[in-house]
Image (cartoon, rainbow, N blue to C red):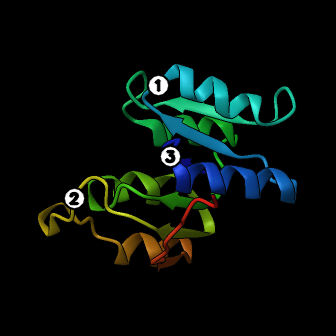
Amino acid sequence: MSSGTGGVSSFALLICLAAGIKPIITSSSDKKLDLAKAAGEPGRVETINYRTFPRWEEEALKLTNGRGVDVVVDNVGPSQAAQSLTALARRGVLSLVGFLGGFNVDQTPDMFSPALQKSLTVRYVKCKIQALT
């Protein structure tokens, strides 16, 4: 599962498709979600508009029949981390790759309890993606 349709999220989408993984992409733009769907075969890419479904983690759980997703690539940060943790399946991985929502430590959720309860792996990934010209 990846939040957004920018460079990092698009890269995650392409990796999922190449690896045979069914991705779930979130965005506030139906147009961008349609583009994400078009990247894969029909029915291959699931999408959630987080403006339509502010509790997008519940939609992710519905799409996985309550199981949760295996990996969340979160580029929003603390303001969304609680939802990302809820969306994860047992033994899931949360990769924090950005802080588009800011880095307000007052919004940082309790990550310790969910990580223990679900046996999660939480990683902060610092990456730099450059376009090839």
> Disc 1 and disc 3: Cα gap in Å?
12 Å
> Disc 3 and disc 2: Cα gap in Å?
16 Å
Q: x and y percent of residue 80 in the render?
A: 34, 52
Q: Amino acid at mark 1?
A: Ser
Disc tally is: 3
Q: Is residue 17 above or below residue 104?
A: above
The image quadrant that residue 112 belongs to is: bottom left
Marks 1 & 3, CB-CB < 8 Å contact:
no
Q: Residue furthest left?
A: 106
Asked if residue 80 lies left or right of residue 70, the reply is: left
Q: Amino acid at mark 3?
A: Gly
The secondary structure type at the circle numbered 3 is loop
Mark 2, residues whose alpha carbon is within 10 Å: few (<14), some, or many (≥20)? few
Which residue is rendered at x = 85% and y = 26% of the image?
A: 42
Q: Which mark is residue 29?
A: 1
Q: Which mark is residue 102?
A: 2
Mark 1, residues whose alpha carbon is within 10 Å: few (<14), some, or many (≥20)? some
Indicate which label's residue lies in the foreground, 1 or 3: 3
The residue that disc 3 covers is 6
Marks 3 & 2, CB-CB < 8 Å contact:
no
> Sequence order check: which comes first, mark 1 or mark 2?
1
